[in-house]
Image (tube, rainbow, N blue to C red):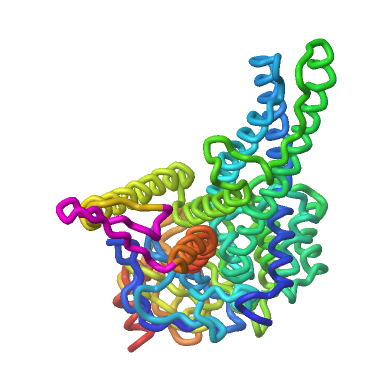
Amino acid sequence: MNQFFSFRRFSLLISKHWADNKKRYLLSVIGFALLLIVWFIFTILVDPHSPMQQEVQILTFFFALFGTGAFYASQYFRDLGSRAKGINFLLVPASAVEKILCSILFTIVIFFSVFTAVFYLVDVLMVTISNQFLTSHNPIRQEGVINVFRAAILPFDGISTLNVLLIFFTVQSIFLLGSVYFAKYSFIKTVICSFVVFFLLFCLIYVLYEYVMPRGGYVNGFTSYRVSRFNAGEDHLVQIPGWIDDMIYFVLMYAITPFLWVVSYYRLKEKQV
Amino acid sequence: MVSIQNLSFSYRKKPVFNGLNLSFQAGHVYGLLGKNGTGKSSLLRNIAGLLFPQKGTISVNGFTPGDRLPIFLQDVFMVPEEFYLPDIPVPDFIRSYVPFYPRFNSDKFRDYMAVFEIPSDSTLQNMSYGQKKKVLISFALASNAKLLLMDEPTNGLDIMSKSQLRKILAQALDEERCIIISTHQVKDLENLIDRITVIDDGKILFDQNVEDISRKLSFRFAIDEADLADALYSESSLAGNVIVTPSREEEETRLDLELLYKAIVTNSSKITKLFHP
């Protein structure tokens, strides 16, 4: 049998993970649904004249998705922080690829599907209730259920929700890597490390922009740069080929996540207990 | 089955092994003895692929443990001192873990559980530490893994369970299987172990078959002062002085592992000379 990946072992690993954690997962789902109901009731009480606004629904969806998703991903490999659980995990006869793929399946695919399903279940219920009971006494416009895949996110008008979902997968992968990397307090440590990395990147870009680039500014994205020549009285437009822009976009949107998975794989392979 | 060549291993700045050479063969039960912190558990975890050597090589059934290939993991089962079992019913545990071990024998698992007097349909969550350990040991033996690594297997077991464990281990040993037991409780597994390996300060202090030990050493009460003077190790008791002494011709005494261990630790040079003249 292939020692790198076997579909049979992979499916066994999924069954094992489910058997080991189903009680915790089911309780978490119920807890999340109840919290969501409490939250929506709170928003209705705060603003009873326009209950269940679509902005509230969509912001709730994305804040909860990112918050709970990152926390769940940061806890996936927490067993490795305990000697007893770590031994149990590492000695299961499955390859590191299968173990990483199982983590991706649970923290990204299954988490997103279950989260969306639970959110809609509660959302539809709350929208129906608020439309039925609250608006029947008040002349208020009835709100509909939001489609999170088509909604415009107000503060980020230029970003489609599908792109936000791609960012979500990247964030999940960052926290998954943090979970393999840090034996304890992986959520907090990953948050701190992510801030440090982003701050350093920001500083690097700032330094490059301020001190390395000639005086001027970007025009229509990052592929065109106008160099100001005050003395000569004539500006120059420097353009790089469009494919570089496409490539940068592709890398940022699609390549970082698989790269993080590959790093997680190697980190898991070299994990010792 | 297990070949360790020139193994060096350390925890950050604390060296554990430096140039260790050792081998373990199928068909034997090895007793790994030593003081606390001498590296017994670290050695088992190196063999299982949970720790990686800094220098040297380890080969188990032809595989490098650190690669943790599924084919290797199917044939190595470790019962650690600190272990974890999920809080699920035993039948669910069996359903989700057994398919990973192609040679798992469910009938034997039920037999072992019966010997340990644990109901097969109980839930792991409601079990005591000792009961959980018995489930894990039953699973380990029923997995038919060729290499079984047990770290302090009798810790947490009551007196009856210890004798049940001896009985089960004796049943489970066959020509293809190698069992390595690391323990402080030497008395618990006295009649089971057929080769004694004593580790001290990251080195092998003693490594001999029980047969050779019984032939070359005698464990008995001292008859007179001269007997006491010749002893490799002596210990006073209510019934007199117990001694470990070189065997006289055709003398056969019962091996006392605890006395042997004390003799090796306190008088290793004379014992080594006796076995390697």
- Whether residue A101 is visible to the viewer of this picture, yes or no, is yes
Q: From this viewpoint, which residue is outermost toward the bottom? A: B277
Please tell me which residue is depicted at 37% across the width and 49% down the height of the picture. A198
In the picture, the quarter occupied by the N terminus of chain B is bottom right
Residue A227 magenta: yes
Q: For residue A55, which quarter of the picture?
A: top right
Nearest to the observer: residue B101 or residue B18: B101
Residue A50's spot in the image, x, y percent?
A: 70, 19
Residue B63's spot in the image, x, y percent?
A: 53, 82
- Above or below residue A20? Residue A87 is below
- Above or below residue A19? Residue B5 is below
Nearest to the observer: residue A85 or residue B193: A85
- Above or below residue A36? Residue A226 is below
Q: For residue B18, which quarter of the picture?
A: bottom left
Total labels drawn: 0
Please tell me which residue is depicted at 59% across the width and 69% down the height of the picture. A97
Q: From this viewpoint, which residue is outermost toward the front? A: A233
In the picture, the quarter occupied by the C terminus of chain B is bottom left
Residue B136's spot in the image, x, y percent?
A: 67, 59
Please tell me which residue is depicted at 67% across the width and 72% down the height of the picture. B170
- Whether residue B222 is visible to the viewer of this picture, yes or no, is no
Q: For residue B216, which quarter of the picture?
A: bottom left
Nearest to the observer: residue A246 or residue B116: A246
Task: Characterize the magenta stretch by its predominant secondary structure.
Answer: loop
Magenta region: which residues?
A220-241
Please tell me which residue is depicted at 35% across the width and 87% down the height of the picture. B276
